[in-house]
Amino acid sequence: MLLENKVAIVTGGTKGMGKAIALKFAQEGCNVVVTSRHINEAQKVAKEIEKLGHRSLGIKADISKNAEVKEMAAQTIRQFKKIDILVNNAGGVDVTGGDTTDATEADWDHILDVNLKGVFLCCMAVVPHMKKQKSGKIINISSMGAVNPAVSVLHYHAAKAGVLGLNTNLAFELAPFNIHVNAIVPGPIETPFWDSLQSPGPERDKFFKALAAKEVPLGRMGTPEDIAGPALFLASGMSDYVTGQVIYVAGGQPLLSQAATFLSAQGQ
Ligand SMILES: NC(=O)c1ccc[n+]([C@@H]2O[C@H](COP(=O)([O-])OP(=O)(O)OC[C@H]3O[C@@H](n4cnc5c(N)ncnc54)[C@H](O)[C@@H]3O)[C@@H](O)[C@H]2O)c1
């Protein structure tokens, strides 16, 4: 067991990558706190984790709201007395558009609040506990769009690039406290993340197939489990000499030389 008796917080852990990470950690002996904006969903995943034989807690926390984030850390400490691992997974784009023709200030503020400020707030709430323990693992989920955008989404990609900046600075500041900070840059992963762009169904399957064939060297879309494995590596003692790094978990992206244009794959 790679995470025996460890305590992890996984933000947005009720579906997609977050849920896969939460379950993978539990399978490795970890007690996992699952957070979500919806308490029922968080508690549902917590029950699944308890069935694996480990303690769990579902907490309602919108990561863009400081009071809720502080309470998330406080509740975890009350219940488990420590926080070994923080996975800053929650995020996404719930607005349409986002290029120079249609990005709005309101969308910018909202998307930055969730995808960048939220990561900052979670770190600020959890790091003091990790410092006291003189140990910790923080895993930040960025996006390929931060480094090699396939479509223009200014606010989301800027936020995810900000996460990489935060990652580097935190790793630098926290290394003397034996706190490891690393980021994962996912490629295209099949999760509910895509629902706002296109509903699940045969059309979306066709789009994913075309996208994977054209733009992913390994020739397939990623699964949430593809992210959970590298997250486990970064959470465990197997990565104790790794900090400030960025792992691309993207099927080989961005190895291909042609420009990524995944939306244009839709018609194929
Ligand atoms: N799926 C992809 O192709 C892809 C690619 C690159 C990066 N990402 C990033 O990976 C992470 C996980 O996404 P996913 O693909 O599993 O998507 P998902 O939509 O399945 O899961 C995202 C989770 O974050 C939660 N969330 C969103 N806003 C929140 C907030 N303000 N407070 C608390 N929780 C909130 C959602 O409720 C959901 O549980 C996200 O940060 C996303 O931006 C996804």
Image (spheres, rainbow, N blue to C red):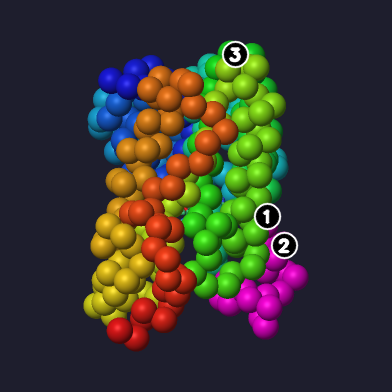
Q: Nearer the viewer, residue 147 or 37?
A: 147
The spot of residue 50 in percent (x, y) is: 31, 30
Extreme residue in the front direction: 257
Element class at badge 1: helix
The residue that mark 3 highlights is: 134
Label 1 crowding class (10 Å Cα cut-off): few <14, some 14-19, many 20+?
Answer: some
Amino acid type assigned to the residue bearing label 1 in the image? Asp
Residue found 36% across the figure and 74% down from its top: 199
Residue that protrudes farthest toward the top in the picture? 133
How many marks are shown on the rendered structure? 3
The yes-or-no answer for disc 1 within 8 Å of ligand 1 is: yes
On-image quarter of the N terminus = top left
Answer yes or no: do the residues labelled 1 and 2 have beta carbons within 8 Å? Answer: yes
Q: Can residue 125 be seen by looking at this rendering?
A: no
Three-letter code, disc 2: Asp
Specify the segment rendered in magenta.
Answer: 95-113
Q: Identify the residue position indicated by label 1 in the image.
A: 113
Which image quarter holds the C terminus? bottom left
Give the labeled residue for mark 2.
109
